[in-house]
């Protein structure tokens, strides 16, 4: 055995003793293209997070750093490589600045509240958990609970921000609790208390998990991250967090393109936390418990969505690779827009981009798909 091999073995043992991590190290990827502050900002954040607790893999152009780089020079190729590395198991999670999650998956943010410096989970911050607002927020609560448990909060307290639909969400979550789903509600710091939270509760971090609609959550993430920098440099918090869903297996965490290197470093550590805490498995377990507590019945009673009398079943065309994005479709019309394209023999999928709902079709069918949706009234030219 060579001296170098012996030295490497002793180094691994020393690192394991120091970190408490024995066996193969967790690997967290991060894409480096797309930041408004440049590649250097992302690499600086990655180097800041490089404590030896886990390995960091940069996915992007060549750069002068000691960190591992998987070299790509185009954003589209970068995300393809990211998915390849995730699906092969080479990396355990990845932090990126843009990703189209499927409907049913939303990201769970993690902020440091300004009044008392307390961490708080924001559920959720990007993506769409469901096309019905009330169902989406109830799912957001379970996503938030799952994420909180994965980072070590055994019995997270849950508050519901006082936005449209909050009382119906409260009713639904309390029905789940009455049916046997274990959920602990937070209490507002205001005199009248209760689990429906005010703005004051946001500032102090009254609950461990603050449930809100995704668009509001996205705004709060930006405010908490950059209220003291003028808004163009997100300096605090852990980023917009991991995409969580009922049956979602990838671990992809989101940063804003305005995120600064301190947030980049925190996001990488957040990724490590949810990998070690098996956030995907926890979410599946939580939904299994919620289903036993009549989750589907509770959602059905709250949403009462009537099906169209003249609706007919539309057969899905053969699947194709879908990379062409069509924007400008209202979230409430998203599934109907997909169905409209299916009726025309065009395979399509729904998704959520950074700017809102999208329909994804094959690159060669982008033009005809747009024309079809314009004619049917789902989007404007």
Image: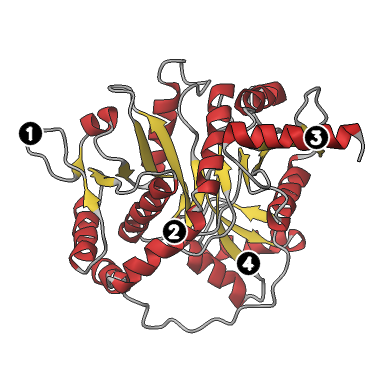
Q: Earlier in the sequence, mark 4 or mark 1?
A: 1
| Residue 31 shows in the view | no
Q: Earlier in the sequence, mark 3 or mark 4?
A: 3
Which residue is label 4 attached to? 348
Q: Quadrant of the N terminus?
A: top right
Residue 217 image offset from top left, x and y in percent: 38, 40
Q: Can you tell which quarter of the image residue 114 is in?
A: top left
Residue sticking out furthest to the right: 2
Question: Could you say whether the residue bearing mark 4 is in a helix, strand or loop?
Answer: strand
Which residue is label 3 attached to? 8
Q: CA distance from mark 4 to mark 1?
A: 51 Å
How many residues crowd around disc 3 within 10 Å: few (fewer than 14), some, or many (20 or more)?
few
Label 4–label 1 contact, CB within 8 A: no
| Residue 231 shows in the view | yes
How many residues crowd around disc 4 within 10 Å: few (fewer than 14), some, or many (20 or more)?
many
Q: Can you tell which quarter of the image residue 216 is in?
A: top left
How many residues crowd around disc 1 within 10 Å: few (fewer than 14), some, or many (20 or more)?
few
Which residue is label 1 attached to? 191
Residue 133 image offset from top left, x and y in percent: 34, 56
Could you tell whether 380 is left or right of 90 in the image? Answer: left
Name the residue at 78% across, 46% down: 77
Could you tell whether 173 is left or right of 378 in the image? Answer: left
Q: Name the foreground residue: 275 vs 190.
A: 275
Label 1–label 2 contact, CB within 8 A: no
Give residue 283's mark: 2
Q: Name the foreground residue: 157 vs 195.
A: 157
């Amino acid at each position: 055995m060579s001296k170098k091999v012996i030295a490497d073995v002793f180094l691994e043992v020393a690192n394991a003793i120091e970190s408490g991590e024995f066996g193969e190290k967790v690997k967290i990827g991060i894409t480096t293209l797309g930041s408004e502050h440049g590649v250097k900002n992302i690499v600086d954040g990655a180097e800041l997070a490089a404590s030896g607790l886990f390995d960091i893999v940069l996915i992007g152009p060549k750069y002068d750093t000691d960190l591992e780089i998987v070299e790509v020079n185009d954003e589209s190729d970068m995300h393809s490589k990211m998915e390849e590395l995730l699906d092969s198991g080479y990396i355990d999670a990845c932090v990126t600045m843009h990703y189209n999650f499927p409907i049913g998956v939303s990201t769970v943010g993690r902020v440091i509240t300004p009044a008392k410096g307390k961490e708080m989970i924001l559920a959720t911050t990007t993506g769409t958990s469901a096309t019905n607002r009330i169902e989406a927020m109830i799912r957001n609560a379970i996503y938030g609970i799952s994420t909180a448990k994965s980072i070590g909060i055994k019995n997270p307290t849950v508050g519901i921000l006082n936005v449209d639909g909050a009382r119906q969400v409260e009713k639904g979550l309390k029905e789940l609790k009455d049916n046997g789903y274990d959920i602990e509600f937070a209490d507002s710091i205001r005199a009248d208390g209760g689990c429906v939270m005010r703005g004051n509760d946001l500032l102090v971090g009254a609950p461990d998990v603050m449930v809100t609609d995704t668009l509001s959550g996205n705004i709060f993430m930006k405010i908490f991250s950059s209220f003291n920098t003028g808004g163009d440099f997100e300096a605090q918090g852990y980023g917009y967090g991991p995409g969580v869903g009922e049956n979602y297996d990838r671990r992809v965490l989101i940063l804003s393109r305005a995120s600064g290197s301190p947030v980049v470093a925190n996001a990488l550590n957040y990724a490590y936390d949810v990998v070690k805490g098996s956030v995907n498995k926890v979410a599946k377990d939580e939904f299994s418990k919620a289903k036993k507590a009549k989750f589907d019945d509770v959602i059905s009673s709250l949403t009462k969505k009537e099906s169209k009398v003249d609706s007919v079943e539309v057969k899905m065309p053969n699947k194709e690779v879908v990379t062409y994005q069509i924007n400008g479709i209202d979230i409430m019309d998203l599934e109907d827009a997909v169905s409209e394209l299916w009726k025309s023999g065009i395979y399509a999928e729904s998704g959520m981009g950074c700017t809102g709902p999208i329909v994804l079709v094959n690159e060669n069918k982008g033009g005809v798909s747009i024309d079809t949706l314009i004619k049917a009234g789902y989007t404007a030219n």
